[in-house]
Image: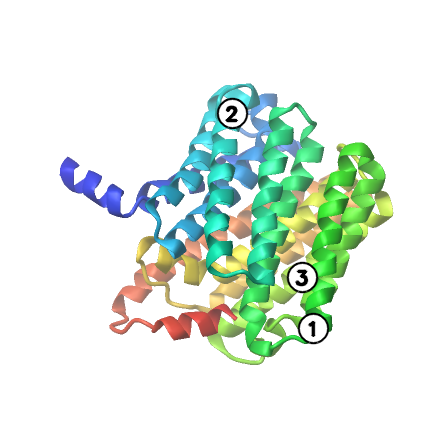
Amino acid sequence: MISRFWATLHTRPQILLVPLALLALMVALWAGLLRMGWHLPIASASLAALHGPLILVGFFGTVIGLERAIALQRHWMYLAPLGTALGGLTILFWGSTGPGPFLIMFGSVIACAAFVIILRQHLALWTVTMSLGALAWCIGNAFWLAGQPLFVVSLWWAGFLVLTIAGERLELGRLLQHSRFVQWAFAVIVMFMLVSLFFIVADYTNGTRLVGVAWLALALWLLRYDIARRTVRKRGLTRFIAVCLLSGYVWLAVSGAIGFIYGGLPAGPIYDAFLHALFVGFVFAMIFGHAPIIIPAFLGIKVAYQSTFYIPLVLLHCSLLLRVIGDLANWMVLRQWGGMFNVLAILGFIGLIIVATKQARTITTLPTRGHHLQDAG
């Protein structure tokens, strides 16, 4: 039994890494509720302070690194998600003063090395964009190790997620054959975003305004030119993914607008609205949309699409709207309940995915790779 487990772990490391990523997510959600003032068991200031690193690095970083390692089929690339997963687990016990940030830095360096190979194989605007995202992650982790405040580091981590997602969307949009002007506009937005991230180190307030402009511009570009505008007219899983994407782009624009209007704030309700419009509204909408495709690739488990997937998606967006309104109006109760229902929406979606995997066992035929790519659009 033990030998079989180790053999499976050697050939499919995701069997271990996926549970570690989910553990980081669960603890991060719990810590997030503590930060919002909910009185829950295991309430401690140290745990609440780990909400950001756990969800941004321990969960998102591990999932993205794992997706890249599976796609490229290089065993050494699994060191990237392994480093972030173990780093997230380590900061849970030792905080940011222990070896956790070093493990996370190691994982991000491996992720950058992976993109060196990708760029050598295929040099294109979308690969450059995702590579710059990995570089932003490395720089953010280096700033974290250097003692920069977490509100500065978080924007670099945000840049990693935004550029990764934008690069993936540009890749799938190749079927549209964008004009040179459209591609140059995308490239200008990406470069402006990177310059803005560097600027926040010197001037956090105005640098955040520039980052907000970049996110707003990227959101408008995606709403105008992303292939989801066409696939939303289809049915089933394809439409669900498109709805997730388009609704996420709206929240990216909202986050950008808040950043531009209010500038950089180190804490408080406006800061909460600025970050969570991005991380909950934009990034988790992407997670919801691609989970039915990513899970089969990660675990070899089929997921049967259900129209009930829309329920947690709608709950996610409606509760986030309440949360942002509560933040902007400084209405703590509304903000707290919005945050609680954010968590329930995420947990509800995970529950529906588990049910969908059980229902998929009755399906006798697997979709082809081409169908997966079509759905991903």
- Helix, strand or loop for disc 3: helix
- Helix, strand or loop for disc 1: helix
- Which numbered disc covers residue 42? 2
Please tell me whether residue 22 is drawn above or below residue 362 in the rendered image.
above
Mark before the other along the chain sequence, 2 or 1:
2
Please tell me whether residue 26 is drawn above or below residue 130 in the rendered image.
above
Based on the displayed image, in which of its 4 quarters is residue 356 positioned? Answer: bottom left
The residue that appears at 60% across and 77% down in the rendered structure is 177
Quadrant, the N terminus = top left
Q: Amino acid at mark 2?
A: Ile
Residue that carries the numbered disc 1 in the rendered image: 180
Residue that carries the numbered disc 3 in the rendered image: 249
The residue that appears at 47% across and 37% down in the rendered structure is 107
| Residue 285 appears in the figure | no
The picture places residue 216, in percent across and down from the top left corner, at: 76, 57
Whether pointer 2 and pointer 3 mark residues with C-beta atoms closer than 8 Å, the reply is no
The residue that appears at 69% across and 27% down in the rendered structure is 148
Mark toward the viewer: 3 or 1: 1
Mark before the other along the chain sequence, 2 or 3:
2
